[in-house]
Image: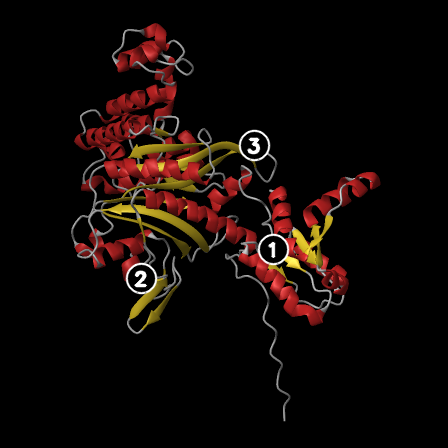
């Protein structure tokens, strides 16, 4: 009889594109999400948890074909349906809004937090499973809903620990770009191909820069590898109009440097008050102290009006931005937190109105030791066509999504999250026959709200118990053997102070600063509390 082949052991490794999260990371994320949820709840948003699995038909974005049924999503066939893990939290919201439209209030405010999955090639910082944190309003056509999202996003960043001055929320409007394209002669069904190339080119502004985008508006561009990308074939005049939008901030900066132009835009003759456009307050113009960034919003809107000229949709977009600014300023959200910025071009093919992006402005050091701005941690906008897929009727919607992992990384960079979570108080075991007494101790600590545990490994080697406590990052160890039980006392070891003393102190200092205390058994909880409070 042939010998049965031994089955190989499975490899103990995380699948490619996925990652495991341990105690401190999970705790930090949960605490941050709890703070975010509190802000959303304060704004009147309700929590929603949708199924992790949707029909591929409902997801809509990635429709499986015969040859590649898993393209974009993790999908499988069940009976006659294709099912898939959700790739974001917005598509499930659209399904819910359509399915329960007769039961839900309108407008419907909801927030959702949870993992999403994308069957895409993983890379550095790009995973196949990651957390999203969304808030959306469905059924509100007014840009008051967009202004509310921006205000809520500002409050959220400050609530989790990003101080004012370390972030800025940038707002733009897809309708303004539509107006620019109309002025450039790119409206109408016959210009759909050219318009698509232009939109994709503008979306690549961050990667290609102004010159790269300009090349794609014309004949095309050759990249570093020699590959040629065909352009939109616009004339110089048409490209100038589009680039006026793409590079709008350069034109705006020029206007702000020209005090006379600023005064003209603001309808003021007090040119001298604006001689230092980026430094001086403008009390004379507004009757209150106002920074140049607030003047900037006014100049930006005037500049955008010039770009869209007589375009009806473009003018409507500028009017919506002006309305958003007015509503935000009425609540105290000025340009130190939220600004109009034409450079925000996220998801141009997806959004239908205002778009916004939260950028963290403080510097961090990259993997090569170079300083750089932290960058974007959240974004969103108005998408009025998504629910229409289910209902056949346009349903206005707007929302924002926060990059949970990026925001956590930002909080760590600001020192707002400890790199290692404080572990539990460890009750060591000196006599395994007294386990009931040790359990009584830990029960008292837990009843007092102190995180604690009894050592459940082999108690034979006491040194291993302290090593265990060190690996757990435990702040305190409780020690009691036969002598302590006979005397009604316990030994309480401050592990944090002990480590500091062992590392830095001289012998004399070590004698003067004991890290272990002998206290009556009845005072155990009070002494542990005192030590923990002293550790901060």
Q: Is residue 487 left or right of residue 476?
A: right
Residue placed furthest toward the right: 507
Query: Could you tell me which secondary element the residue under label 1 belongs to?
Result: loop
Task: Name the residue located 29 percent from the left edge and 32 percent from the top edge.
Answer: 234
- Assign the N terminus to one quadrant of the image: bottom right
- Disc 1 crowd, CA 10 A, few/some/many (<14, 14-19, 20+): some
> In 3D space, how far apart are the residues under numbered discs 2 and 3 (Cα atoms)?
43 Å
Task: Name the residue located 65 percent from the left edge and 64 percent from the top edge.
Answer: 438
According to the picture, the residue beneath numbered tag 2 turns out to be: 56
According to the picture, the residue beneath numbered tag 1 turns out to be: 424
Q: Of residues 46 and 351, which is closer to you in this image?
A: 46
Vertical side of 280 occupied by 467: above or below: below
Task: Name the residue located 40 percent from the left edge and 45 percent from the top edge.
Answer: 36
2 and 1 marks in contact (CB < 8 Å): no
Q: Which x, y percent locates residue 421?
A: 58, 50
Mark number displayed over residue 371: 3
Vertical side of 108 occupied by 359: above or below: above
Badge nearest the viewer, 3 or 1: 1
Q: Which x, y percent locates residue 11?
A: 59, 68
Q: Of residues 465 and 328, which is closer to you in this image?
A: 465
Q: Which x, y percent locates residue 343?
A: 36, 31
> In 3D space, how far apart are the residues under numbered discs 3 and 1 (Cα atoms)?
37 Å
Task: Name the residue located 54 percent from the left edge and 41 percent from the top edge.
Answer: 412
Badge nearest the viewer, 2 or 1: 1
Q: Which x, y percent locates residue 56?
A: 31, 62
């Amino acid at each position: 009889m042939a010998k049965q082949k031994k089955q190989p052991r499975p490899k103990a490794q995380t699948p490619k594109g996925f990652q495991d999260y341990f105690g401190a990371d999970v705790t930090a994320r949960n605490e941050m999400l709890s703070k975010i949820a509190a802000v959303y709840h304060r704004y009147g948003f309700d929590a929603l948890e949708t199924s992790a699995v949707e029909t591929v038909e409902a997801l809509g974005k990635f429709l499986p074909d015969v040859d590649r049924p898993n393209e974009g999503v993790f999908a499988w066939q069940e009976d006659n349906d294709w099912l898939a893990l959700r790739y974001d939290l917005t598509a499930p919201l659209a399904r819910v809004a359509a399915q329960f439209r007769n039961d839900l209030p309108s407008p419907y405010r909801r927030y959702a937090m949870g993992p999403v999955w994308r069957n895409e090639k993983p890379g550095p910082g790009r995973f196949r499973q990651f957390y999203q944190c969304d808030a959306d309003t469905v059924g509100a056509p007014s840009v008051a809903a967009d202004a509310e999202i921006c205000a809520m996003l500002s409050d959220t960043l400050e609530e989790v620990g990003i101080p004012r001055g370390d972030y800025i929320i940038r707002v733009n409007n897809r309708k303004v770009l539509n107006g620019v394209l109309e002025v450039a002669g790119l409206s109408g069904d016959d210009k759909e191909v050219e318009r698509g190339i232009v939109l994709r080119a503008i979306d690549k502004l961050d990667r290609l820069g102004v010159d790269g985008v300009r090349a794609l508006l014309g004949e095309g561009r050759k990249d570093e590898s020699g590959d040629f990308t065909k352009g939109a074939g616009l004339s110089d005049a048409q490209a100038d109009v589009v680039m006026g939008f793409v590079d709008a901030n350069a034109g705006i900066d020029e206007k702000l440097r020209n005090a006379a132009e600023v005064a003209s835009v603001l309808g003021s003759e007090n040119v001298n008050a604006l001689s230092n456009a980026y430094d001086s307050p403008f009390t004379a113009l507004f009757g209150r102290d106002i920074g140049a960034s607030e003047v900037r919003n006014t100049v930006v809107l005037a500049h955008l009006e010039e770009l869209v000229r007589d375009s009806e949709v473009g003018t409507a977009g500028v009017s919506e931005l002006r309305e958003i600014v007015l509503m935000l300023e009425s609540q105290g959200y000025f340009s130190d937190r939220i600004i109009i910025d034409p450079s925000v071009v996220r998801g141009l093919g997806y959004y239908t109105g205002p778009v916004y992006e939260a950028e963290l402005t403080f510097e961090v050091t990259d993997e090569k030791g170079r300083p750089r701005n932290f960058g974007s941690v959240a974004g969103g906008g108005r998408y009025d066509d998504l629910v229409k897929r289910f209902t056949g009727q346009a349903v206005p919607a707007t929302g924002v999504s926060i990059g949970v992992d990026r925001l956590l990384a930002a909080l760590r960079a600001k020192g707002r999250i400890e790199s290692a979570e404080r572990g539990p108080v460890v009750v060591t075991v000196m006599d395994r026959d007294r386990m009931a007494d040790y359990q009584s101790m830990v029960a008292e600590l837990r009843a007092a709200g102190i995180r604690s545990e009894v050592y459940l490994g082999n108690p034979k080697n006491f040194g291993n118990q302290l090593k265990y406590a060190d690996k757990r990052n435990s702040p305190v160890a409780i020690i009691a053997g036969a002598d302590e039980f006979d005397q009604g006392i316990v030994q309480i070891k401050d592990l944090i102070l002990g480590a500091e003393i062992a590392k830095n102190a001289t012998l004399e200092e070590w004698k003067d600063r004991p890290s272990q205390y002998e206290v009556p058994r009845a005072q155990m909880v009070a002494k542990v509390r005192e030590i923990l409070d002293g550790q901060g």
